[in-house]
Amino acid sequence: MKKLALALMIALLLVAGGVMAQDDVVLEFQQWWEPELPEGSFRAILDDFEAQNPGIRVETISGPYLTTKDQIIASAATGTMADVVGLDGAWVNVLWKQGALASLTQAMMDAEYDDSELAAQIRLAGETYMIPIANFIYPVFVNLDMLEAAGIDPPTTRAEFAAAAMALTDPDNNVYGWAQPLSLEQPNGIQNDTMSWLWASGGSMLDDMGMPHLAGNEALAGTLEYLKSLHDAGVVAPGSFAMKENEKVEEFVNGRVAMIVNTLAHFTLIRERNPDLNFDITALPAAEGYDGPRGLPYASWGIGISANTEHKAEAWKLIDYLTSVEGNTKLTSIANAFPGNVNATPDFIQTDPLFETAFAIFQEGYLANEFTGLPAAEELMRQMAEPFQYYLEGDIDLDELLEIAQEEWEAIFE
Amino acid sequence: MPYAYLSPTLLLLAALTVLPIATVFLYSLVDNVIVNPNPPNFVGLDNYEEVLTNRKFRGALGNTLYFALVSVVAHFIIGLSFALLLNSRLLSANVKALFRVIYILPWVFTASIIAILWRLLMNPHGVINFLLLEFGLIPELMEWLSDRDLALNAVTFINIWSGYPFYLVSFLAGLQGIPDDLYEAGRVDGGNGWQLFRHITLPQLKPIIISLALLDFIWTVHQFTLIWMTTGGGPMRSTEVLSTYTYKAAFSSHEYSIASTIAMVILAICTFVAIFYVRSQRMADE
Amino acid sequence: MIGSRRQIRLRKALIWLALILGACFAGLPVLWMVSSSFKSNLEIFAYPPALIDSSFSFKAYQEVLGNPESLRFFFNSYLVAILVTICTVLTSILAGYSFSRYNFRFKKALNLIIIGVQSVPPITLMIPYFGLIVWLGIYNSYLALVLTYMVFTLSYAIIMMTGYFNTLPRDLDEAVMIDGGGSFVTLWRILVPISLPGIVAVGVYTFMLAWNEFLFALTLTRTNDMRTVPIGIHLLMGQHSFEWNQMMALSVLGSLPVLILFLLFQRYFIAGMSAGSIKG
């Protein structure tokens, strides 16, 4: 009975496999976007693509974001990688090193593609391997009701920010000026809530050769010292060392934190969670006296092609569509993201005043995420987060922190 | 004859585990694999030297042993106490049925949801702090998972909560196998409750206790999701255990050879413990 | 030893007290999970927290149940967990019998090997194991999941079955052997019925593991029609935010049938008790 059931199941599977598409080219597209977007909306875009490209069908393989990188590495190692994959700037390097990604420079040449409309391309050893098609910038979100009650304007410099955070903090009522997630499980708090302060003041964590420049980096030392002063002043929400991005936003939504560095991807969420919350966004404060353009941290949904795909031309067609004015406008409109095509204009930019502000911040600054494309970027963040925690606790001083991190980073870059 | 009974097991294990484990062992002998474009070079025991002399590895080993030993002892005590309670003659069958279901509750959820639930409960603004504060048991909000003095005990507590039902169910089954006349004979000899427990219940359960403790030790050493999703090994490595350390080596630093080496060290530790089990088995035979 | 009535009443009160304290330890966190599944995502993080608040609704349940995908996840989880339980229990009874009742040359070594295969951290095993499954051509199938969970649970199951058989006196099987029954008859007629509580315990353990496993379920499947409940829960953990109440609702829904199943199987604990008394 049991054996029969098993045999039956296997037979069914084989049949199901055999029935699939005789003539059509089936592209597998592995990403984490479909579950992030309103139900059915991502499929609708792919349907549009299929309608315009007869003979190609796209099959989505969707997984949770947190495990997508591990899954792609494992599938590349076992020869089961999908034809087209969603990429994050923090992983592209390791997949490239693994030999899992095809050169997009080559694909563009084969298709005689004009890349002038692309806002950015992630290059490794001179060739493009990832194209960011949707970008989520990280400005500062402020709780306007709390600011108004305290009679404060949204801060624009570090000193103003510290003063505001101080004025807004009220531990007896569980209210804090700022939150800094430093979880070691998801160490992207180092990118979004720590290094972002450096980039906003025009600083860099790398030298001219693109190698780590932490020890002896005065701008970085100043930034970290400033952040420690916020912790020492008690204006940072408790639980920082285990906090993750998704909890930071819940603290903000519940009115327990007045200001956070936060992704624009949270707009809809904040409004859905708490329609009464009166909030605004502003650029990340810069160091006193800095008036250059401000680097804006961002996260991207990037796209790439498997090195082993048998349908490289078709895979490129899909990327071409998703980066075209039409496809990119549709995708970024449902994702509330800034486009990867310079000529695409998602509809929310005109219809939503908050996005208008965000767009202005975006245009005045420049996209800055130095972790994109670095080797083992997540591990770099973690190797920064760990000594940073020791520093905040007072176990080590600033120089020791920078030297430890410098050493760990250099080992990874080797 | 014994081999015939073992054949399905041996076939399955041979087919599905020999190759992967051998591969992991080979990985541990070369300089790098999987994400390295260069062909791997044989480096002998260099990886083992690197791992065993690493300060972070030894810290993780210490945390793992603490985590595993405290968990195993607590699981045993709680599991056995609950099993004895649920076996009491003074309770009606329906009451026992109801409480059996309540007592196995922690077992029916997947590890990641347990981690998320306890993160909510142990949040600085979570319900545990609220209740303790209301009853005046703590002076201020505690950072259970982000204070280095509390975090390891906090995750151990979560693991104790989520793991004891395995013992409970096994002991409940084991207790049913103890013949009533043993107890009757004991009572005739004038034994009290404690003496009956010590001289009848415990010795009768001994084979199960030894099996459970061994399994649970291996199980806890491998516990990954609970720790990873609650603290990520932090703050400041205070909850770093071998499983989180291995994961980071494999999927964050992308040093699969090092991860495989740690895996082999874990295998050695567990086998060492298993030898005691096998010896106890032999004694049971005699 | 049999005390006065007052003593019995006191003992009963103490037992009840312990019973209720234990139930609080085991149940309160779960009660909080249930309560969260009825809250809005805003109220889940509210401070001071409340067990039931104004946001009480069944919305999370409606969204989970309204999604045909999650129903498929449930179906897959049950199918896989039940198949694994049956296969593992049968296999481990045979193996446990062998270890408990026979002495043979490689017994110690085989015992060590069976524990050993369980001692390699699954995370490091994942990639080579994945490669093997792909090579065998069973990637993205129920068969892959069933065989994998059998590998995961067999060691535990065998060790536990050996433990249970070891608690049973040997004169039992010898009596049958003398009557002319073979070892196979002894096993099925005598040992298995007596060990039902142990078998149920092993079955429950196997079911739970197969039901709750995430990493290999994700790695070894590709399409959503093959995926299980734990993956469904993870799909609610977004890149930037979680659907807390839906995750809780999905876990609560997932646990209900398991609890009912356990409630039904409980009577075997009691059945075992009467069988156990026969043997003395």
Image (cartoon, coloured by chain):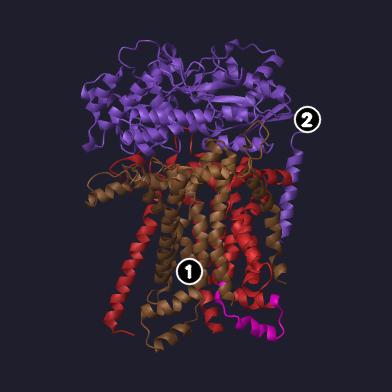
Chain colours: A purple, B brown, C red
Residue B236 in the image, given as x and y percentages of width and height: 39, 40
Residue A116 lies, with reference to residue B186, above or below; the image says above
* Label 2 – label 1 distance at C-alpha: 60 Å
> At x 54% / y 11%, what residue is drawn?
A343
Q: Amino acid at mark 1?
A: Phe
As drawn, the residue found furthest toward the bottom would be: B188
Residue at image mark 1:
B171
Q: Which mark is residue A23?
A: 2
Q: Secondary structure at mark 1?
A: helix
Q: Is residue C240 visible?
A: no
Quadrant placement of the C terminus of chain B? bottom right
Say which chain tag 1 marks. B
Q: Which mark is residue A42?
A: none
Q: Is residue C119 visible?
A: yes
Q: Main secondary structure of the magenta part?
A: helix
Task: Using the rendered image, report if marks 2 and 1 lie on a common chain.
Answer: no
Q: Is residue B156 magenta?
A: no
Which stretch did the figure color magenta? C164-184
Residue C269 in the image, given as x and y percentages of width and height: 51, 71
Q: Amino acid at mark 2?
A: Asp
Q: Secondary structure at mark 2?
A: loop
